[in-house]
Image (cartoon, rainbow, N blue to C red):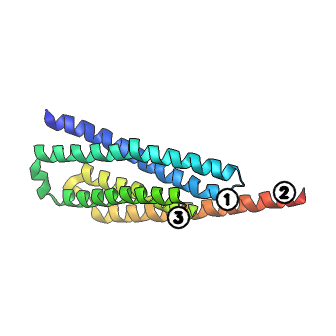
């Protein structure tokens, strides 16, 4: 019975953690891009984003990570033999990368609060895709376990990364065109 409780709360923790990670970096993007706004909007937006980022990280994202990891440990105590499986080694590696990403986001949060973040909005958009790639890899490993077709999976994940990169570039181009169009309209008035 313990296995099912651990698994239930592990899944809930994963959902909460990923929701927080996805939204957190999106807030970072808005925070960085608020720098382009005129005053007083710039100060108001940056202050509001800073409050939202801190609350999201401290109240949702970090507890989600803690629940996820704690319940994973519980799961492993009920079925320690899975630690002998190669798929679990890769899953734990990807989860370790995800935990490092989480703490790196905490570092970016502090840099943004201090006005020291050097990341651009476009760079943060790319960073925001990392948990998606990790989520796909982890879920594939958990579902397929030892029967995961590595060749198809590798090509699929690389294709997903290329598509994400292309989408980020296309979005950046559209935003530039929209700004240029707006500047032209303003100059004509």
Residue lying furthest right: 189
The image shows residue 21 at horizontal and vertical percentages of 42, 50
User: Which residue is under mark 1?
Assistant: 36
Local crowd size for mark 3, using a 10 Å CA cut-off: few (<14), some (14–19), many (≥20): few
Residue lying furthest front: 114
The image shows residue 16 at horizontal and vertical percentages of 37, 42
Q: Nearer the viewer, mark 1 or mark 2?
A: 1
Q: CA distance from mark 2 to mark 3?
A: 32 Å
N-terminal of the pair, mark 1 or mark 2, is 1
SS under mark 1: helix
Which residue is located at x 9 percent, y 52 percent?
Answer: 81
User: Which residue is under mark 3?
Assistant: 116
Is 145 on the left or on the right of 159, as rendered?
A: left
Q: Is residue 128 visible?
A: no
User: Which residue is under mark 2?
Assistant: 186
The one of 155 and 36 positioned closer to us in this rendering: 36
Q: Is residue 153 visible?
A: yes
Which residue is located at x 72 percent, y 62 percent?
Answer: 177
The one of 115 and 32 positioned closer to us in this rendering: 115
């Amino acid at each position: 019975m313990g296995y099912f409780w651990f698994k239930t709360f592990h899944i809930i923790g994963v959902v909460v953690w990923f929701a927080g990670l996805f939204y957190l970096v999106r807030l970072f993007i808005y925070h960085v891009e608020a720098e382009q706004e005129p005053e007083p909007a710039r100060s108001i937006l940056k202050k509001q984003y800073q409050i939202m980022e801190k609350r999201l990280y401290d109240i949702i994202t970090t507890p989600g990570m803690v629940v996820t990891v704690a319940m994973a440990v519980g799961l492993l105590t009920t079925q320690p033999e899975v630690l002998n499986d190669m798929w679990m080694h890769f899953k734990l590696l990807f989860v370790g990368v995800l935990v490092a990403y989480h703490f790196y986001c905490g570092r970016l949060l502090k840099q943004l609060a201090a006005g020291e973040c050097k990341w651009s909005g476009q760079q943060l958009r790319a960073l925001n895709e990392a948990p998606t790639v990790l989520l796909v890899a982890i879920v594939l490993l958990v579902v397929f376990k030892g029967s995961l077709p590595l060749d198809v999976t590798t090509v699929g994940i690389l294709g997903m990364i290329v598509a994400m990169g292309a989408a980020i570039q296309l979005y950046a181009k559209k935003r530039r065109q929209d700004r240029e169009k707006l500047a032209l309209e303003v100059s004509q008035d």
